[in-house]
Image (spheres, helix red, strand yellow):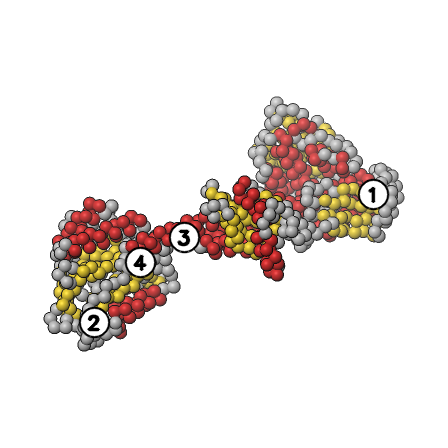
């Protein structure tokens, strides 16, 4: 085989030709292989697939790495074989930028990485050569198919190998090399490499007449050097051993060893065998690395999902060590910093639970060389810091939005140290964990503020009134970090009567809370001045139109005072609010009472008719917000009918019992968190029957 001036220029009518231009991208070799594979399938040249893909990968990869320009890949298949040309658009000779210098060394250790491309082309191709054009340069190779009887297209035959091992000093025959190089792993085997390596080792040992041989491989996974394949007897130590290192990248390392003299025939064949095996080991390394990276990506995605689901600070910090141990380390500890920069152990975990007390004791130790000092250094400098004995590992800072929250310390595995992939994953976990902790802290602060603000909009207790029973229940929405617009109140009037109020301001959040506070304060001021309810509602409507920021409010107001005999007189006004339920102590179904009016804050003028109701001893009125009737179970609403049916059996019960039972019934209607605030206010005539 030799380098020639260029590929054949003539094409037949049955030729299959494909030409594509590909970018200088890491995915280009895969795209080039796909083009070659499709052409071979069209031309029924499957027997050339392995060599064609191997050489195409080498040339396209080296062109991407060294030329760094777009590539033209031309593939031509005919009845006799396949021709592939890989051209780039870089200036200079081929051996400088593209596929590398042809290396004629016989020792695999002397083959430079950039020289492998043409070496493989020279080994496998029937013919090959280089092309030079004004726009760039390229390399082409030709693979000829063989007939079933071993004849080449020109009628010549391939010489048979020496089956008896004679003539070991002669050059390896083309048939022997072809048989050796066409050996490929079984793609359907669970682990094809051992069988492939054994087959390859057996073939080369028989060709060189070796008494024994072994292939050793260390994958760098902590298992040490393993025997991948063995042939015959164990090679004896001495000068007659033929050793060839496998050309694999870290963390892989290995060698091919034959119990045979390193003759001029045996060494090149062993080198070629080692290189053939190295290519598949490199594929195995890349495949395992790809599978491992995909597993890490899946792990990071699942970790992010778990961390994002928790909005509780303590639970989030307790979850982090459980994610890390034992997959990424023997032990893990999360420390947080207080406002003075002091570290506090928030959570820790160990693969061996019996070691947890010792881990806690070690983490608490003080001193200039202690783990505590290393953790403070990592937190202060914001960099990865190694941890010494007795708990070896390293610490990474927890930083979110520029704020240093603490450290994540991880102990190394018992069998091996963390590799670069694991360290990168741990740093990514630390970033995601810090963000989850910060989000949980922000949510906790928002929840605390919302609860404080919500409590300020509700009366701390309902006033005790002789002969009148008041009871209320309030359930905030499931997202308790937002303030709802529901409120209730009981306000004393100057004439000795009481004003019962329940309302609902549209929307949620701080703006809704501000409007709720405005409505509540205006009602208290106007009621304290003795304004009649129609005037109170009119002025409140004007205030909301001017200062309500486009929000509206529904209200139910009832003035309660002594009536005839032992009855209570109730003057009811509804401003767009749901009608309350009336429960008579004598029994009978509950009924809705009152006449609807206009919600406040929508129109300049409103209408709010007055309804007079007399409550006998034991009778009660049940006020509520739409969070009760609009409670959802899928597409089904709780509704007013269920509310009436639930209230009817409660006639005659105390106000606090009625409120609690209705709250429980509404909550238990669905397993979902409430989507809206639930407020229930019960007014009862507690005059003795």
* Residue 95: image location, x then y, percent: 69, 28
Q: Considering the numbered disc 1 on the image, is that residue within a helix, a strand or a loop?
A: strand
Q: Is residue 283 above or below residue 351?
A: above
Which quadrant does the C terminus fall into?
bottom left
Q: Which residue is mark 4?
A: 677
Q: Nearer the viewer, residue 30 or 545?
A: 545
Q: Which residue is mark 2?
A: 686
Q: Which one is closest to the eye, mark 2 or mark 1?
A: 2
Q: Nearer the viewer, residue 277 or 498?
A: 498
Q: Which mark is residue 242?
A: 1
Q: Is residue 546 above or below residue 17?
A: below
Disc 4 to disc 1, C-alpha distance? 82 Å
Disc 4 to disc 2, C-alpha distance? 28 Å
Give the left or right position of residue 597, taking residue 54 as reference. Answer: left
Report which quarter residue 22 is drawn in.
top right
Sequence-earlier tag: 3 or 2: 3
Q: Which residue is mark 3?
A: 444
Sequence-earlier tag: 3 or 4: 3
Disc 3 to disc 1, C-alpha distance? 69 Å
Disc 2 to disc 1, C-alpha distance? 106 Å
* Residue 59: image location, x then y, percent: 66, 35
């Amino acid at each position: 085989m030799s380098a020639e001036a260029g590929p054949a220029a003539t094409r037949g009518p049955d030729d299959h030709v494909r030409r594509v231009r590909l970018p200088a991208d890491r995915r280009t070799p895969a795209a080039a292989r796909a083009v070659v594979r499709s052409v071979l399938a069209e031309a029924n040249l499957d027997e050339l697939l392995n060599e064609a893909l191997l050489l195409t990968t080498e040339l396209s990869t080296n062109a991407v790495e060294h030329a760094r320009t777009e590539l033209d890949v031309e593939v031509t298949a005919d009845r006799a074989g396949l021709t592939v040309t890989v051209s780039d658009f870089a200036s200079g000779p081929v051996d400088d930028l593209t596929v590398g210098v042809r290396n004629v060394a016989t020792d695999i250790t002397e083959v430079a990485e950039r020289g492998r491309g043409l070496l493989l082309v020279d080994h496998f191709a029937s013919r090959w050569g280089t092309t030079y054009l004004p726009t760039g340069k390229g390399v082409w190779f030709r693979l000829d198919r063989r007939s079933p009887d071993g004849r080449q297209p020109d009628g010549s035959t391939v010489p048979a190998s020496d089956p008896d091992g004679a003539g070991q000093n002669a050059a390896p025959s083309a048939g022997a090399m072809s048989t050796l190089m066409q050996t490929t792993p079984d793609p359907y085997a669970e682990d094809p490499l051992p069988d492939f390596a054994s087959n390859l080792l057996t073939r080369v040992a028989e060709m060189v007449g070796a008494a024994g041989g072994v292939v050793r491989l260390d994958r760098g996974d902590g298992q040490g050097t393993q025997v991948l394949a063995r042939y015959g007897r164990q090679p004896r130590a001495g000068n007659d051993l033929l050793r060839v290192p496998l050309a694999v990248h870290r963390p892989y390392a290995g060698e091919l060893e034959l119990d045979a003299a390193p003759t001029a025939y045996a060494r090149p064949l062993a080198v070629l065998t080692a290189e053939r095996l190295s290519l598949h080991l490199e594929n195995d390394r890349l495949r395992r690395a790809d599978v491992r990276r995909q597993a890490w990506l899946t792990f990071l995605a699942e970790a992010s999902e778990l961390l994002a689901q928790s909005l509780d600070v303590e639970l989030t910090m307790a979850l982090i060590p459980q994610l890390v141990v034992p997959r990424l380390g023997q032990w893990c500890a999360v420390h947080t910093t207080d406002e003075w920069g002091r570290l506090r152990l928030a959570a820790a975990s160990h693969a061996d639970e019996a070691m947890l007390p010792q881990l806690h004791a070690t983490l608490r130790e003080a001193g200039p060389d202690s783990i505590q000092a290393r953790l403070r250094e990592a937190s202060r400098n914001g960099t990865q810091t190694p941890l010494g004995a007795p708990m070896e590992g390293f610490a990474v800072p927890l930083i979110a939005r520029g704020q240093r929250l603490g450290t994540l310390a991880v102990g190394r595995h018992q069998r091996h140290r963390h590799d670069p992939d694991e360290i990168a994953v741990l740093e990514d976990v630390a970033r995601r964990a810090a963000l989850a902790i910060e989000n949980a802290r922000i949510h906790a602060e928002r929840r605390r503020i919302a609860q404080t603000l919500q409590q300020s909009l509700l009366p701390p207790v309902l006033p005790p009134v002789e002969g009148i029973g008041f009871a209320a229940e309030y359930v905030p929405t499931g997202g308790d970090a937002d303030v709802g617009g529901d409120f209730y109140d009981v306000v004393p009037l100057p004439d000795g009567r009481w004003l019962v109020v329940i309302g609902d301001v549209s929307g949620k959040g701080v703006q809704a809370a501000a409007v709720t506070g405005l409505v509540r304060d205006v009602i208290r001021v106007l009621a304290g001045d003795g304004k009649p309810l129609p005037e109170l509602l009119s002025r409140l409507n004007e205030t909301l139109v001017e200062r309500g920021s486009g929000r509206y409010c529904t209200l139910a107001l009832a003035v309660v005072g002594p009536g005839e005999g032992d009855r209570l007189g109730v003057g009811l006004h509804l401003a767009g609010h749901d009608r309350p339920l009336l429960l008579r102590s004598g029994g009978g179904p509950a009924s809705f009472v009152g006449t609807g009016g206009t919600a406040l804050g929508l129109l300049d003028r409103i209408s709010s008719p007055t309804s007079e109701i007399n409550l006998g001893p034991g009778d009660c009125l049940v006020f509520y917000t739409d969070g009760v009737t609009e409670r959802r179970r899928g597409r089904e609403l709780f509704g007013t009918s269920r509310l009436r049916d639930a209230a009817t059996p409660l006639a005659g019960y105390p106000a606090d019992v009625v409120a609690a039972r209705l709250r429980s019934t509404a909550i238990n209607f669905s397993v979902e968190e409430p989507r809206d605030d639930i407020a229930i206010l019960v007014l009862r005539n507690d005059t003795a029957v």
